[in-house]
Amino acid sequence: MVVIVMALATSLTSTTSGGQLGISLSSVISFNSTLAMLLWFWTQLETSLGAIARLKGFEEVTLSENKPRETSVPNEEWPASGAIDFKNVSASYGQGAPALRDISFHINAGEKIGICGRTGSGKSSLLSVLLRIIDIDSGSLAIDGLDLELIRRETIRSRLITIPQDPFILSGSLRLNADPGGNASDESIIAALTKVGLWDILESRGGLEANMNTNPLSQGQLQIFCLARAMLRTGKGKVLVLDEATSSVDSETDLLMQRLIREEFSECTVLTVAHRLDTIMDSDRVIVLDAGKLVEMGSPEELMKREGAFWGLRGGSHSD
């Protein structure tokens, strides 16, 4: 383009001024930049259209996990008390061997339950059934008298409060991550983060508008942050589920989390899958699983006196 402009300027010297030539050259340079941007945007458009097509195809061929009979809509207060009933529950992953075998127990409203067992015993599978991540092969499961197999899965998961082993962070602000549903006030978010000891750190990084991905928290801080997120939902549900939530934190952070759970969720039913058995020694009752079966259930003191499976997991000693 520059060569063409210069050739025209040379051949039309009698009618072309220096200013016109300068403007022409400037326009050529701008045109090149504009053309480069156009090509970049066109490439991005093609990439995006391909991604949209794949997503559309995935949506069309992927069956909804909700079953036709999952139509029951519980009231806004459910679960209002948090009583849980497992009756002869068996479950498996696909066509594999059963992960849970004929599990039956009742959890009273507000009871604190520890769940333990060796690797592969069915601890996480028990929570997966409760959250409807895997289906029940036989038996029934109810919370506050409502059969979970009749309730839409997203409703169940939105009403139960969970703290996972691996904390998740959304791409966005501190406010979004603390309260993804947008239901809590700024004052409530700050109060929760203050209770867990994170607000001073996060305030210095930009407060509620700080980007959580720009300056990430440590693993222990992330786990405490997830606890603060759960605390903001204490008025929305009466069941708290913890899946080895303290397995990757130090003992000091573990003690802090246990204290806050006792204080903030005192009126909730709490189910804790434990890696460290010390964290469930103050539970009302402990469920011990082995190979997908419930082998013991009782208070920690009772189970230690029996010198059975729980006693063995604790190292076979009464000294603790």
Image (cartoon, rainbow, N blue to C red):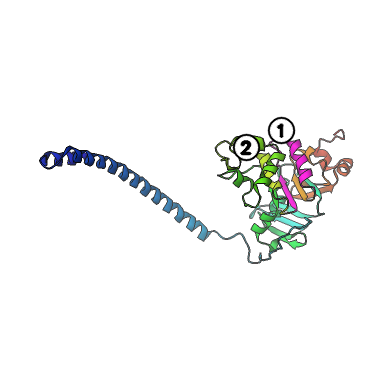
Residue 245 located within the stretch drawn in magenta: yes
Residue plotted at (72% across, 40% down):
195
CA distance for labels 1 and 2: 24 Å
Question: Residue 203 has which mark?
Answer: 2
Out of 253 and 117, give the one closest to the viewer. 253
Residue plotted at (71% across, 61% down):
76
Q: Name the residue under label 1.
A: 250
Question: Residue 193 has which mark?
Answer: none
Indicate the amino acid at tag 2.
Glu
Position of 298 compared to 161: left or right? Answer: right
Is residue 195 in view? Answer: yes
Indicate the quadrant containing the N terminus: top left, top right, bottom left or bottom right: top left
Query: Splitting the image into 4 quarters, where does residue 311 fall?
Result: top right
Residue 116 located within the stretch drawn in magenta: no
* Number of numbered markers: 2
Q: Position of residue 202 (x, y in %)?
A: 62, 37
Mark 1, mark 2: which one is toward the viewer? 2
Position of 112 compared to 6: left or right? Answer: right
Callout 2 crowding tier (Cα within 10 Å): few <14, some 14–19, many ≥20: some
Asked if 298 appears above or below 312 in the picture, the reply is: below
Boundaries of the magenta span: 238-266
Of callouts 1 and 2, the N-terminal one: 2
Is residue 163 in view? Answer: no
Callout 1 crowding tier (Cα within 10 Å): few <14, some 14–19, many ≥20: few
Q: What element carries label 1?
A: loop
Whether label 1 touches label 2, CB < 8 Å: no
Indicate the amino acid at tag 1.
Asp
